[in-house]
């Protein structure tokens, strides 16, 4: 299939893009990398009257530190995140996650802002933003506003972004030195949509979790920060306590069913990722294999 007929406008500035969005409202779609939007249009899943192309807005590209924050422009491409020394130093989880995003051709064109605005529940970056306590910066007719990532994602392909607003940047707290990370997903082939994925961060002291955050994706209509992590903080992690956390996680999840997996399969795979995560972060492989030392 091919996209329905549409008009096209190339924005010359952020102000010009906002003017176009104000003029056309929800009949417009913003084009950045286009790696999600164009396939959706070709399948007639969306049929905008006009595309507002912001691809030339260089002021929306780049990665920099500002005090204790890492600021990423919305048009920064996936490949730039993957190669950036600042990302490797201050947000290494993103570097690991990007390696799982689709294929090199997609990563060369796709942008962080486009991925977040698209809000696919199987995408890696939305879960990372929630886990890392990111702030999404948007600009609209009345100025800028900052939205916590946990409040930004509202459902399948749904965000807190209004039709007249433009996502312009992402702000991340600079990673604390003690933090360690885990990222893994199940997909039928590398680069395919995730069946279940987990992005995690932790502070480990003397073999115990002083802090643990578990950001699951592809298990519902938006990223999930699992409260089951609390069962593993400031306690001795044993087979029993890990089993209790795993059972709590299964109760917490409300996976969708699609052609890739049933809810039961997604719950099982999420529990597998939980065990692998804990075993990896604590350097205790027996917790994953189930073999008592």
Image (spheres, rainbow, N blue to C red):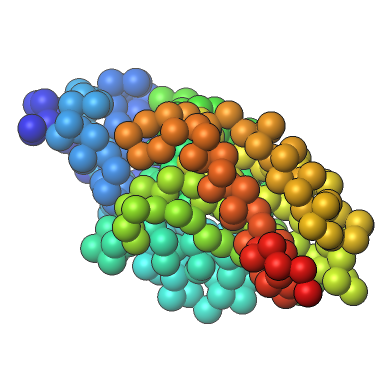
Q: Is residue 212 visible?
A: yes
Q: Is residue 138 above or below residue 287?
A: above
Residue 201 relative to residue 236: left or right? left
Quarter of the C terminus within the rendering: bottom right
Residue positioned 49% across, 40% down in the render: 265
Q: Nearer the viewer, residue 203 or 176?
A: 203
Relative image position of residue 21 (x, y in whole percent): 35, 28
Relative image position of residue 196 (x, y in whole percent): 49, 47
Q: Nearer the viewer, residue 116 or 74?
A: 116
Residue 176 relative to residue 80: left or right? right
Q: Nearer the viewer, residue 198 or 60?
A: 198
Q: Is residue 153 above or below residue 212?
A: above
Quarter of the N terminus within the rendering: top left
Relative image position of residue 12 (x, y in whole percent): 28, 47
Q: Is residue 85 above or below residue 76?
A: below
Q: Is residue 175 visible?
A: no
Relative image position of residue 243 (x, y in whole percent): 76, 49
Residue 71 relative to residue 238: left or right? left
Residue positioned 32% across, 58% down in the render: 189
Residue positioned 48% across, 74% down in the render: 84
Residue positioned 34% across, 21% down in the render: 26
Extreme-bottom residue of the structure: 85
Residue 228 occupies quadrant = top right
Q: How many marks?
A: 0
């Amino acid at each position: 299939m091919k996209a329905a007929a549409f008009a096209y406008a190339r924005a010359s500035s952020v102000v010009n893009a906002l003017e176009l969005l104000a003029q056309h409202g929800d009949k417009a779609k913003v084009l950045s990398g286009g790696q999600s939007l164009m396939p959706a249009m070709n399948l007639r899943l969306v049929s905008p009257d006009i595309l507002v192309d912001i691809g030339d807005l260089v002021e929306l590209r780049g990665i920099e530190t500002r005090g204790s924050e890492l600021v990423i422009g919305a048009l920064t491409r996936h490949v730039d995140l993957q190669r950036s020394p600042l990302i490797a130093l201050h947000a290494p989880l993103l570097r690991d996650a990007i390696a799982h995003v689709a294929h090199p051709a997609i990563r060369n064109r796709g942008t962080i802002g486009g991925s977040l605005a698209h809000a696919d529940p199987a995408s890696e970056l939305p879960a990372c933003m929630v886990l890392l306590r990111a702030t999404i910066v948007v600009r609209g007719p009345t100025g800028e506003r900052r939205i916590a990532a946990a409040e930004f994602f509202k459902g399948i392909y749904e965000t807190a972004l209004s039709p007249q607003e433009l996502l312009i940047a992402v702000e991340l707290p600079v990673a604390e030195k003690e933090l360690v990370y885990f990222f893994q997903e199940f997909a039928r082939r590398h680069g395919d949509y995730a069946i279940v994925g987990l992005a995690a961060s932790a502070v480990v002291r003397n073999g115990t979790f002083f802090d643990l955050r578990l950001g699951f994706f592809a298990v519902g209509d938006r990223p999930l920060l699992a409260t089951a992590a609390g069962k593993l903080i400031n306690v001795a992690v044993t087979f029993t306590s890990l089993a209790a956390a795993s059972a709590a996680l299964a109760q917490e999840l409300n996976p969708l069913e699609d052609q890739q997996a049933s809810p039961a399969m997604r719950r099982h795979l999420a529990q597998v990722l939980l065990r692998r995560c804990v075993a990896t972060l604590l350097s205790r492989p027996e917790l994953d294999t189930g073999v008592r030392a």
